[in-house]
Image (cartoon, rainbow, N blue to C red):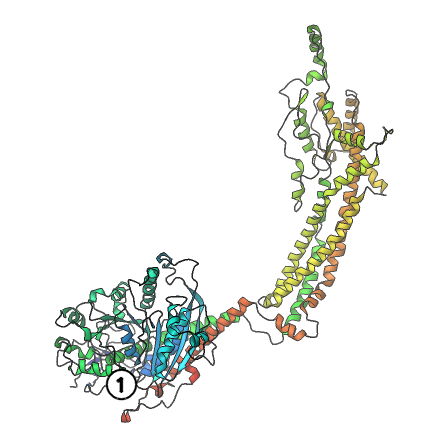
Amino acid sequence: MPHLATRRARHIGAVVKPDPEPIPPPGNASDYGTLGDELPGSARYGRGDRSNAPAPSERTVESDPVFREVRAKNNPAATSVPAAGSPKNMDESFFHTSFQDIGKKLKACNDTLGELQQLGVSHDVQLPELVLVGDQSAGKSSLMSGLANLDLPRSEGACTRCPLHIRVSRNAEWSCRVWLRKEYVYEPPPRPIHESDVTAHDPFFPWKKRPSTLVLEFKTMHDKSEIEEVLRWAQIAILNDDKHHGLFVPGRGSIASNVPIDKAAEEPQAKFSPNIVALEIKGPDLPDLSFYDMPGIFQNPADANDEYLVNVVRNLSSAYIQHPSAIIICAMPMNSDAENSATFGLTRKLKAKDRTIGVLTKADLLPDGGNHAQWLEIMKGQAHSTGLGYFITSRPQGKDLEELKKWEERMFEDESVDKWPEAFHEFVHRCGVERLKAFLSERLGEEFAKSLPNIKHKVKLNLDKVNRQLANLPELPHNVELEIQTCLNSFADSARIKIDEFAARINSLPANFRDCLLEIKPKFVLKDRSDIPVIALSDDESDAASVATTSAATPSKRRQPTAQATPSKRSRTDYSAAGPSNTVKPEDAGNSINGNSFGPQQPLPPAHRQGLAEPFGEFWEVGRGFRTLRQVREEIRAKMKAGMPSIIPPDVYNDLAMEAIRPWKGPTSVYLREVIRQLSAELDSALNESFENLKKRYIYPEAKRHLKSCLDKHWDTTQKALEELYSGEAERVMTYNTEAFDQCLKSERAVLARFRHYMRMVAAGYKQKPLAPWEAMTEEMQMQEVKRRESEQARLNPDEFEREVEVVAYVRGYYKLAALRYSDAVTQRIVCRMIPAIRRELRNYLDDKLGVRGPDAMRVYEKLMDEDAATASKRAMLKLEQAKFIQALQSIEDLESGKLSDTASIVESNGFQAEPVLRRRESDVTMENEIRYDEA
């Protein structure tokens, strides 16, 4: 019988909100819900045992009571009662204006919600959603078929290895459209998969997250008999991520046409997928619902190798349960103990109990005469409580949809099924799939309407973000020729300026090259063992005493103390102090003087290590230990002509000089390479500045590549020219610059004489002051040192290596002259030939190589403005995202403006539901025409 219920109302713009109601007593139960639930046509459902406290924005002032009507239970279509109040202004929440009567707008809400979900907006914005979860064999498939009002496949393994997203709505004609929504890509390892592979950071291993969702249309059907086959093939396509989905489309795909479906189902690439098979089902008498059906949670896989799938399936259900806007439908069979439900335990563990609706399935299998207390306690909210209460369903196998509907009517309403205990009759308002569908449909529409302003705001934020990203990836300019020519002209001007500046400030590098050649000159050892006077010792004691007595005033006596530093050590110190310019290596590091013997000694660091600038530091050892004086003597003897003992053969001078020049090839290559490197850096900088706006276009890497090839070409040309210069220097001694040669020879003679004298004095045992650098001495100091050497010369015997020292002076003098001549020639070839040639030819070279001067220039311009693959892929992805958010925003705005209001109208005359007068454009609810999601 109809009854009255008082409700609280807010002031203008408020939403009617039900008071909590007690569980109706048996026989006086309302026809529909418990805990404040209303009939399907009412404005809102109650919140069950959820808090009825008003939201912060709600007002709690009492208004006049609002009546609601409960019709007889054989008339399920109840009229809704409009809530009191009207919006204050047009800027208020959409919920307060257009959706005070949720029941009337139910179809519009759920259609828009399903469309947003199908677009993939839920990937970016939290949307209200229904999620059907449960253990395996919990009757979930039967429940899903009942909710979708469709005989969905119940074949073994069908639709249980990937999530299903089912969107159901009313329409004059029946149709079913199937998509594959791929958010993950399958990347299995080259080994068996273990449980340890599935982690919190990789919950669906070996499936990896894609950068963006890929939506692929699979097939559209208008015949209900096709749906089982199509859904099975869609799942097989989802599990074979490495193959094109079109191969599995029934009636078109080669695999679907040639391979039996059972065999294809046995051999998929993956045994499970987190990707989604999405269905959009339209038809007469369908509820307005959109829900996800998750694979059933299980504990013991048939194959021990699939143990990891236990965690993967659990993780997938957990991921959906944790969505804060998700309404969880948890299926528990009544032929099993409620304590055994792993899924229900998961909802409590994830703190989703308040968002959960429990559904007790398989009521027809409730054990006869068993203990029904646990189920009664559950229905009364005394055990396993949920925020949204429980429903009971019964869907025996072997019956079609119409038979199942009548079965539940007989069992729950007519009470004509003896197996259904009388104790459960009081919960008739919570029994049957039809009541569950109405409750879910209205609940989902209510949640969507409440969250719509926030959803719209987040969609706008995402659209703005995508638009900003696209703005950084500009489209093809209108005039590509002008754009490219402007950049090329800018680069040519900038390159000329930078080349001129580079040539003007290149002084240090040529100077370092010249210094390197001078530093690696041949270094001769200017002391010999024979420089030490030999002391003759007598066997007679008197003779020995005489020698000892007289030796106190002789140089040999001064050589005896062992505490004194060896001449070798002193000579090296003096050599270092002399500086790099007039360096002559005094002795091998392995020789030291101790009496009449040469012993090993640790070498001191060479002075010229610090004087060799980069990039020539690698050549610091070149020239060391070139020859000893004794080796020079041996070479003279070997090449001396018979019968001409006093004449030094010219070959001696030539061969030693050419051997000293031979190492120049290394520093020359380094010099040229460094010039090219520095010049390349300057031109790269100019290119980056000039092509700043085209760096994502094909022309930028092409121009960069051709710039490098231009420099490489001039590098090769110059390298060959420098090799010619080197070959000329390394051929033989040749100079007509007698004056310069005489100066170099005189300079080297002075240096060698100075060091040779020092070595001989030290070897003879005379204490010598360290030699000061010759260049650092004043002219007066130099004259004083020359006079001192002349006076000291009388103490020494004639130098037996005088001739060899003269040869060394000649070789080093010519080396110095040739090094100065060669360094200038090399620098001239680089600075005066190569760099100006690059400056002149660079622009024309780029034009020719880019092909902008040919007859097919326009096509070349368009090709040069193509994007690199990464940028093109990113733009394509962003455009898909942009289109998705634009369409989502349009759907929301259409809903707010009331354009879809007529779609919720139901023509109840003769029980026939008419087609809406104002229909949404077909492209508004599909993606194929305006958004190309169907690419492979």
Is 789 situated above or below 686? above
Extreme residue in the bottom direction: 910
Extreme residue in the top direction: 542
Is 471 situated above or below 815? below
**How far from the left and from the top, in percent, is residue 15?**
28, 79
Task: Locate residue 60: give its quadrant.
Answer: bottom left
Please name whichever residue, 370 or 696, is drawn nearer the observer in this view of the structure.
Answer: 370
Task: Locate residue 298: give its quadrant.
Answer: bottom left
Q: Is residue 198 left or right of residue 837?
A: left
> Mark 1 belongs to which amino acid?
Pro
Please name whichever residue, 409 or 48, is drawn nearer the observer in this view of the structure.
Answer: 409
Helix, strand, or loop for circle 1? Answer: loop
The quarter of the rendered structure image containing the N terminus is bottom left
Q: Which residue is mark 1?
A: 82
Q: Residue at x 34, y 61 (%)?
A: 306
Is residue 89 among what the camera can see? Answer: no
Is residue 348 among what the camera can see? Answer: yes
**How far from the left and from the top, in percent, is residue 857?**
67, 74
Is 730 situated above or below 802? below
Please name whichever residue, 258 or 358, is drawn nearer the observer in this view of the structure.
Answer: 258
Q: Is residue 842 left or right of residue 12?
A: right
**How far from the left and from the top, in percent, is residue 450?**
32, 76
Q: How many marks?
A: 1
**How far from the left and from the top, in percent, is residue 517?**
73, 43
Task: Locate residue 293: give its quadrant.
Answer: bottom left
Q: Is residue 666 left or right of residue 779?
A: left
Q: Residue at x 67, y 70 (%)?
A: 485
Q: Is residue 915 left or right of residue 550?
A: left
For label 1, the crowd category at 10 Å Cα-Cα, with few meaning under 14, some 14 to 19 and many 20 or more, is some
